[in-house]
Amino acid sequence: MKLRIKFRKYGVMKFIGHLDMMRYFQKVMRRADIDIAYSGGFSPHQIMSFASPLGVGLMSNGEYLDIEVHSWTSSDQMLFYMNQVMAEGVEILAVRKLPDNAKNAMSSVAFADYTIQFREGYEPSFSLSEILTEFLLQPQILIEKQTKKSSRQVDLKPLIQKLLLTKDGGVFMRVSAGSVENIKPELVMDAVYHFAGEERGEFALEITREDLYDENGWSLIDVGEEF
Amino acid sequence: MRKPALNDEILLTIEKPARYIGNEINSVMKDPAKVDIRFAMCFPDVYEIGMSHLGIQILYDMFNRRDDVWCERVFSPWTDLDQIMREKKIPLFALESQEPLRKFDFLGITLQYEMCYTNILQILELSEIPLLSRDRTEEDPIVIGGGPCTYNPEPIAEFFDFFYIGEGETQYDAIFELYKENRKNGKSRRDFLMKVCQVPGIYVPSFYDTVYHEDGTIQSFTPNIPEAPKCIEKQVVMSLTDAPYPTAPVVPFIKVTQDRVVLEIQRGCIRGCRFCQAGMLYRPLREKDVEVLKDYAEKMLKNTGHEEISLSSLSSSDYSALKEIVTFLVDEFHGKGVNISLPSLRIDAFALDVMSKVQDIKKSSLTFAPEAGSQRMRDVINKGLTEDMILHGAGMAFQGGWNKVKLYFMLGLPGETEEDIKEIAVLSDKIARHYYELIPKEARNGKVQITSSTSFFIPKPFTPFQWAPMNTREDFQNKAHLLNDTFKEQLNRKSLKYNWHEADLSELEGVFARGDRKCAKVLLNAYKKGCLFDSWSEFFQYQKWLEAFREEGVSIDFYNTRERSEDEVFPWDFIDIGVTKSFLRREWQNAKTESVTPNCREKCSGCGASNFKGGVCFETKN
Ligand code: SF4
């Protein structure tokens, strides 16, 4: 059976990169005695896949991985056992059963929510509320997007669903994510700074991914059900 | 949550920030207000190397079992962070509490290889602890050295308050009690050192003076206070089975060199290879009960979630319950997502059977360490591996489907001739010939691949070769080139690959291995010139080291290329490892006459280690 696991990543764990998080979760499965399925061959590996890699330095309240298991107890119990063997800074939020025909987490991702705080001493000098409003009024928001080999021009406008000021002076955004057009929040903020005629400091932003959604706007966890 | 000692900006700038944040599974957090002793356990190399070391995990676990001690870890900051810490004056901190080391009671540094010595100075300097023991005050931590390099601590004696000589399991409780008592009575650092120097195995260098002859050799080495013993006895754990062992070792987030559960099956070695320091230092051989190992294997895999398990020891094939433990691991864990990483085994039917179960025959290789190419030379070094044994073992493996062989040799062994060197290539070629003779063309799975590697022989203290001259850097290079040319002349040269490395590092390692207190100034000088991470070829600065030797007027040849006379007083003579100097001398003579000495299980040679009253010396021989 396929299970979807939602977790949170915070504190110093934000310095643990994606590959190391994968290794970390492989060990979690063994410590928590999860009856996970393995591939065959001389070095069998766990059947496990992540929704979307999170950059080093980012926190998240909505990370996902799918696993395949041979046997299971209940959502509550599995969540409990996994949280028993977690490092501080990672917390399992939900464990759900996926319908047989469900797409895997990685190919489901279509949108992502982010909140952004400004690190002390790096608050923007321009009025964020005014700039954000004007920024979104532009007919087109053209930026250069770097790919591995070259760069190409992208219009951000249709890729930004929401971009708002939060009550505590930060920024909230919902942007396209996943395999078709993955927009990093830094890229949007760069465009905002550029529009305001300023340079963003390299360490200005403290970014938290809030959740991931599929193309119908469902949070990835809503696809599964409790058991 | 703890606040990291380094801010986000730094952690996001440097390579692998996970090296510095702690927080790993099974790392130990305590309330500093509730402990009496803060201990920082240091491996003076980068995190990935240090975290792969078993000894640190054993002591970390053992110390933290005490409620009154909080033991934390610290490793060498990589060069990127090193620079930032110096610029921003950030003091070096321990991983668990993220608090500066200079607040600690003890800084224990494990010394696994000579080429980490500049890193010791880095650790001290970044911690803002005076480099020299004599400059430290009541405010500074007590700096302890432990590990194999303490069997000749003299080149680094001035930097340490004391050395713990031998296996860590035996005396730390006594040391901690003395420390608490000393503090309770309001006594000084010196008072504590005077007490601790009377604990067996503890060497406080400042309580000893060395007088030299005019030629630079040692005339006398004597205590300068009545409390300090003349001779320091190596510490050994006689019951390895009952010794503490970490069933929940710390699990790093990033990939480290040894990323697996390690079961120590035995300590010591029966073989008596004359070049091998570990083989003498850890005598007598002591085994750990196999039932205990099985229990540990289960617990450790469960507590860490590691996907691999391996066995640790010298000469694993000599462990008497080897079949039982390996069979247990394979039956119990193989196929359940746990890889069994086998130690290098003597090739026989059993070894090939388990290898074929846990490794991909097409990808894995056989390993032999003949150490020398000719039988004559193997008799000199007392390596009981014959050509017949190698050809027979390889032949069995070839028939089982293997076609990759790795061979390990040494160059520069005492009394080595050109012929002996060439024999390395000849032996490698013979193994290739054997493959082509034995395996019919249609049954072959491609070419045979023989990879031969040589390292340069460095004479080490407490071995029969401690008297031997070491080759110069030029000798080493010439020998490697001669051998390389010989490889090219072999019939099966296309199936043979030869690897060797630069000799610069070996030269320095030689000096510090058999050096005395006069070497300390060279080390300081080289460190001040910027030498650091010398065991990393990308950072090793040979020219700066040569300058340091020149400026301090210290001769490399004095330590390396001179043959020592049989009655010379060595810097390490005050240490009693159980194995006697007269036994080593006898073995040095046996080497010269190419006489083989039997291993401990064939016949006891009376090396002296039976004084410890246990282990292989008291096994019933049948
Ligand atoms: S005393 Fe004999 S049996 Fe014991 S370690 Fe020495 S040689 Fe081996």
Image (tube, rainbow, N blue to C red):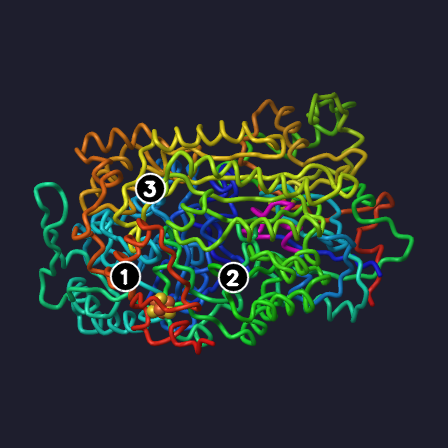
Q: Is residue B433 magenta?
A: no
Q: Which marked residue is nearer to the observer: mark 1 or mark 3?
A: 3
**Chain of the residue on which disc 3 is drawn:** B
| Label 1 and label 3 in one chain | yes
Q: Find out if the beta carbon at label 3 lies less than 8 Å from the nearest ligand 1 atom.
A: no
Question: Quick one: label 1, few (<14), some, or many (20+) residues within 10 Å?
Answer: some
Q: Find out if the beta carbon at label 1 lies less than 8 Å from the nearest ligand 1 atom.
A: yes
Camera-side residue: B252 or B606?
Answer: B606
Label 1 secondary element: helix
Residue B175, percent from left and from top: 28, 70
Camera-side residue: B196 or B431?
Answer: B431
Q: Which residue is mark 1?
A: B583
Locate the C terminus of chain A and report the quarter of the image it occupies.
bottom right
Q: Which residue is mark 2?
A: B316
CB under 8 Å between callouts 2 and 1? no
Decide if residue A86 is on the left or right side of residue A68: left
Camera-side residue: A194 or A39?
Answer: A39
Label 2 secondary element: helix
Q: Amino acid at mark 3?
A: Gly
Locate the N terminus of chain A and report the quarter of the image it occupies.
bottom right
- Residue at 23% of width from left, 61% of height from top? B582
| Label 2 and label 3 in one chain | yes
Camera-side residue: B348 or B596?
Answer: B596
Q: Amino acid at mark 2?
A: Ser
Q: Find out if the beta carbon at label 2 lies less than 8 Å from the nearest ligand 1 atom.
A: no
Q: Which residue is mark 3?
A: B415
Q: Which marked residue is nearer to the observer: mark 2 or mark 3?
A: 3
Residue B233, percent from left and from top: 25, 66
Which residues are drawn in magenta?
Answer: A10-25
Classify A188 as above or below B5: above
Residue at the extreme bottom of the image, as rendered: B620
Q: CA distance from mark 2 to mark 3?
A: 29 Å
